[in-house]
Every structure is written in structure tokens, then in C-alpha cells.
Image (cartoon, helix red, strand yellow):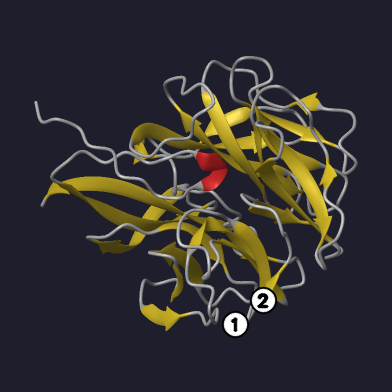
Amino acid sequence: MKKLAVYFFLLSSGVFAQVPEGKQVISSLYIYDMATGKSEMILKEDRHFEAPNWSPDGTFLLINSEGKLEKISPTGENLGFLNTGPIQRANNDHGYSFDGKTLFISSGKPDVERGGSYIYKVAAEGGNPTLITPLSPSYWHGVSPDGKDIVYCAPRNGNYDIYKMSVNGGEEIRLTSEESLDDGPEYSPDGKYIYINSYRTGMMQIWRIKPDGSDPEQMTFDNHSNWFAHISPNNKVATIITYLEDQKEGHPFGRQVKLRLLDLETKEVTDLTEEFYGGQGTINVPSWNPEGTKFAYVRYGLKDL
């Protein structure tokens, strides 16, 4: 057996990916069609990329790789990089406002040599980003439907909790205060809830809270580790990523996972995909198309160097 070496990528919630020594990551971009119940691979490359968003006009997918944001057509053609000025250390937490005018990026600062994740905003077509959060690390995950507030995950007291802030910066408002990890906040399209994943019961499950952090309500109840509820534009269902084995508070790369559909009214969960090799980077951020008929995600593989 080869000795394992740990390679570090700056990732959401401070979790780190692990890749065996002597191996290279293969990344495959898929689109799942809700009508057919099938996934189609549109891009496969011998490199690490992750976290697809779907552009608000439906013309491209946005992925991150090596700190840069790239545009990929829905049929897999590389359309070039999105201009983000001096912000070139993006991690896998990025996404668009509901009106499609603004892109939010979690990234290191160009003047900070290592680590750090700050939240920036930039015009959807690209440009020079504006810093929103002065404190690091801050990992963007959602924006309110009215475009006024962002929600994000951050460790401000030695523990990761959910925070809210105006898109123009200002006061940081803490929404959760559990001793365990809370992560992945995302607004529902009607603005009534913020969906999160939380380890507060000793198993990572999907929850939802009101926009002020009140009335926590558990949404999943099984023995799997469930992360990142991404709400469909119809506000009726959400995709979630499920680790088949309990990962405690971790969201690692390179595990057996599957994607499932959560009914937001009945709380019923159904499988969408078979098991595959994935995890961190597969579906960290909102990835539905504008019509809510398809969503994008990434599967991974390994090959010898």
C-alpha cells in the first residue's frame, strides 16, 4: 500500500481535501436532467475543478480551478475566464444574485500570502471585485432574493456558525450559535427560510431557519452525512449531497457519495444518482439552471502520475 500524503486546498468550512501520493485528480462535469432522470457528462479533464454555478441567462456554467473562475458552455466547450481583476485565489464558494446582476466570490486576498477567505462582489459580466467582509475566513453560500444580504459560514469564536451581512458590508450578524458546525446557508427563493446543514444532533443533517436565525427546523433524519441544500427555482425541492458513511463534521474530497432530492414540504428524500466518487467540490454551491429543470455537478476520479 502506498503511503498517503495530504495535499491541501482551501475549501469551504476549513475542510481539506486528501489526494493519495502519486495520483492526479480527474474531474468530470455532469448535467442532471430532472425530466429524464439521467446525468450527461459534458466535460472530462485531467485536472481538479469544482463547484459549478449556472449563469442567470443559462448560457454557461461557472467553475473554479486553481483560484480562477472559468466559463463552460452547457455542451462542454471552454468559453474562457471570467474577469475578476486582481482577485485570483477563488475557492469553491461563489454564486449569483437572484436578479443575475451580481456575482459573489470567496477568495484569498492578493496581498495576503497564504490562507484567508474573504467575500467579494463583482458585476455578473466581470470586473474589479469589491470587498464585503473584512474578517477572514468567510465563505459565501447565499444571497437574499431581494439582493440586500449575503449569508455565509465563518469561525469567529473558534466554531463555525452562520452569519449575515449587507451586500454593501457593515455589521456582521450571527444567526446560529451551536457548539457544533453549521454550514452551507442558502436562502429559499421566497425569502422565508435559510437552509443550512448542521451537526447539532451528532449527525450532519439539513435544517432550515428563519432569516433572523429563529425557529430551527430539521429537514433530514437519516444515518448519512447530508450537506448543502440547493433550492430549486420552484421552491419545492432541493438537491443535497449525501455521504454514505458518516463523516462527522467533515466534508472531505474522495468519498462515496450520491445526490438526492429533498421535498421541502413532506421532507421526503429520494435518490437522484447512483453512488460515485466525489464530495468536496461536487456541488458546493447553487447549480440549478434558471428554469429549474436541470442542475450541474462534478464527479471525480484518480489516475497515476
Q: Residue at x 61, y 49 (%)?
A: 137
Nearest the viewer among 227 and 232 is 227
Left or right relative to 187: residue 296: left
Q: Position of residue 83 (x, y in %)?
A: 52, 82
Q: Secondary structure at mark 1?
A: loop
* Mark seen at residue 126: 1
Front residue of 257 and 182 = 182
Could you tell me which residue is drawn at 53 percent across and 48 percent down? 284
Residue 278 in view (yes/no)? yes
Label 2 Cα crowd, 10 Å radius (few <14 / some 14-19 / many 20+): many
Residue indicated by mark 2:
122
Say what secondary structure mark 2 lies in: strand
> Residue 65's image quarter?
bottom left
- Left or right, 244 with respect to 43, comes to right
Rendered-image quadrant of the N terminus:
top left
Looking at the picture, how far across and down is residue 58, in whole percent? 58, 73
**Residue at the (45%, 50%) spot, across then down:** 10
Q: Is residue 103 visible?
A: no
Q: Amino acid at mark 1?
A: Gly
The amino acid type, in three-letter code, at marker 2 is: Val
Left or right of 99, for residue 173: right
Q: Are marks 1 and 2 in contact (CB under 8 Å)?
A: yes
Q: Tell me where residue 117 appears, x and y as whole percent.
A: 57, 55
